[in-house]
Structures are given as structure tokens and as C-alpha cells.
Amino acid sequence: MVDATPVPSKPEDTAQGRFRAAGRGPWHGVPPEQWDDWRWQLKNRITTLAELERHLALTPEERAGVILSGSRLAMAITPYFFNLIDPADPTCPIRRQIVPRIEEMSFGPEEMEDPCGEDRSMAAPGLVHRYPDRALFLVTDRCAAYCRYCTRSRVVSGAHGHLDADHEAAIRYIAAHPEIRDVLLSGGDPLLFTDEKLDSLLQRLRAIPHVEFLRIGTRIPIFLPQRITPGLVDILRQHHPLWMSVHVNHPRELTAESRAALARLADAGIPLGNQSVLLRGINDSADVMLELVHGLLLCRVRPYYLYQCDLIRGSAHLRTTVREGIDIINDLRGHTTGYAVPQYVVDGPGGGGKIPLNPEYLLAHDGDSIVLRNFKGDIYEYPEAGRPAPLPSRPSRRHDEIVCLGLD
């Protein structure tokens, strides 16, 4: 019996009612103190076919995908995020992100288990050191919900494999490599740790003198905004400079609840950036992307990256062409504020790292001038000046002069 009766949502006191509450849907009888408890949300995730069919009439492709999901990437959907699904629309952009489909079991020859080559760059179990001055610390293999295009589906959720992480070895490696000034905590989702465990981990990293700042990659404010409690925010505030990258793909994900969670983080002085994945039938149009980036800015989140979907096995039905991504950036640039335009990137297959892609704005360069086009297609020529003579060197101030000037 499918209970798909939507509970009407109401506009919140935000930007012309743009951010609407998710509602409780089939869980309308759950007391507020339980619904707003992130542990209750995790405990009551939809993880089985029977639970999903109780609330949603599945297509044959979805039903087959759910049955087989345990062999590749498990299904888990928080009650909160489930309520963003349109139960009457099999093409719903939320539904396509989190409900398995049989297409996930079709593997193309170009697809890979580890498209970013992370396993080859492991300096310690769970620690990827690819770029010179920064390291990716995979601290857990669990998420609040599982995106069907997950780059780490080989180790996330425990259905196919598991993350072989060793926090002690990773911290020792970071401490022994002074070139590492930036550590990104990811996984899985680090914000699923208890407050105490997360605080301890951040303290240990912050105690390493050459680690200048920390970053956390998370989808918790979107999948599980109830987790962004005042207590968690107080802990994060103690570890500045701390940055956070969130993951929003569609405007419908920006609810009143997620906006409030993001506001708590922003009010704590945590700079927020968003990383979207370009996905077919979800956000592969300039109109949807424009609505998304404007909504993000209203939530005080800077659109940071737009990722071309990685060549993860079973993701062909969600991948777009690179040309489509470039066209979207072309349609954004000049038509909205520069703060709203993310950098479009492709992760070089097999471990090449992030490669930025842009529309063709530089048309020619002959040494004397460059030929450029602007967002409207108008052509401009900009002269290349000769290399200027170096400025005359000046002796630097002596230390005692600096002290006298009060600059030391």
C-alpha cells in the first residue's frame, strides 16, 4: 500500500517564499522532538524495498535497481530528504539522485571502479596525497543517504567494499610532511561522527603546526540538516580557520530546513562553498543551474565547483556531455553575478586531478595582441605590452626600524 499523499508545505519567512519546509509526509504523526532529532532520522532511513514501496510506487526500472543495489551501492534515504521527492513523477530530480535504477548495473568499457585514482595515491590507509600542499583524509565510509552516482561507491555504504582507514597512520603521515598545509576531511561524511569524535579529530589535526587550515566535505546540511545542531556548530567554531564544502545539485534541495542549517554554519564564521555534479535530467540546463546558484547565494554559499560526473561504473544514464557543461557556464557568465558562476571541472580519469574547463573566450594570441570574445559574442582586441623593465631594488628595512615604526 503506497502512502504517497503529500503534506502541503508553506512558504517560510525567506526570500519571497523560495525556501519551503520539506514537511513530514508519511511521517506526519511523528512528534517534532523525534523528527528534529538527527539520530531518529538516521535510525528511520529507508533502506529496503519493502520500506520504499510502502511510500512510493516504483517503476520496473527502480524496483529492479533496488533489488540489486546491495551488490554495488546500498540504498539509504532519510525521511526528511525523502519528502522532497515528487511521488507522481518518475523523472523527479530528487528521486533520480537517490532511488536506485537497473541502469546502475550496466557498465561501459570507459567506466572505472576508482575513476579518480585515489587508491593509487594513498599515502596511508584513508589518506590521499596527490596535490603538493594538501591531503584528502577519508575518515569514514558512511553517509546519511547515498547518491547513485557516488565516486566512492567501491567503498561507501559497505555493500560492495569498505574503506580501509587508519586515522593514526594518516595523522602521523600529515605530521611528518610539512608541505601539507591544507587537509580536507571527507569520506563518507565526517559530520556523521559524534560531536566528541569529530572534535578530537579536528583538535589533533589543528595541533600539527604546518596544517594552516582544515576543510570538511559534507552533504549533511542537505540530507540531514537536523545534524547541524548548536552544539556541533560550537565545536566547529573552535577550529578556525575551517572551511566547508557542501553538495547541492538541484534548487529543490534548498529547503527552509537546509537554509537554516547553512545559516548556523555561516553565522559561526565558516566559509561555505558548493560542489554540484552535472547530472542528466537533474541540473543539465542553464535555467535550473541559474535557479540553483542564486538560491545558494541567498543561503550564503558560494558556488565553487560544477563537476563533470566521474566515470564511475553504472553512471552512464546520469552523465552528460562535456559540451553541455561548457554551454551552461557560457549561459551563466555575464548573465548573473560572478559570485554565482562555479568553475566547471573534469577529474582526469584515473588520477589526473581537477582540470578546469571554460568556454572559448581567448580566440587568438599572436604575441602582439590577443583576440577575445565576451559573453555576448562581441570580439575585442587587447594589445600585449612589451615586458617592462624591472623596478629598481630597494634595501629592506632593518628589524630595529620596523620595531620603531610599530610594525613588528
Image: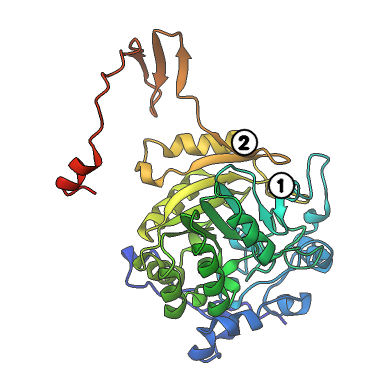
Q: Is residue 113 above or below residue 161?
A: above
Q: Residue visible at 34% across and 43% down?
A: 337
The percent position of residue 64, horizontal first and vertical second, equals 82, 64
Q: Residue visible at 38% across and 11% down?
A: 369
Three-letter amino acid code at the position of disc 2: Val
Q: Is residue 302 above or below residue 257?
A: above
Tell me the quarter of the picture where residue 67 sits.
bottom right
Left-right relation of 182 to 166: left
Labelled pair 2, 1 in contact (Cβ < 8 Å): no
Q: CA distance from mark 2 to mark 1?
A: 26 Å
Secondary structure under badge 1?
A: helix
Q: Is residue 345 above or below residue 390?
A: below
Q: Is residue 169 above or below residue 232?
A: above
Secondary structure under badge 2?
A: helix
The percent position of residue 241, horizontal first and vertical second, equals 41, 59
Residue at the spot of label 1: 121
Tell me the quarter of the picture where residue 104 sits.
bottom right
Residue at the spot of label 2: 322
Please tell me how crowded label 2 is: few (under 14), some (14-19), or many (20+) other residues with Cα within 10 Å.
Answer: some
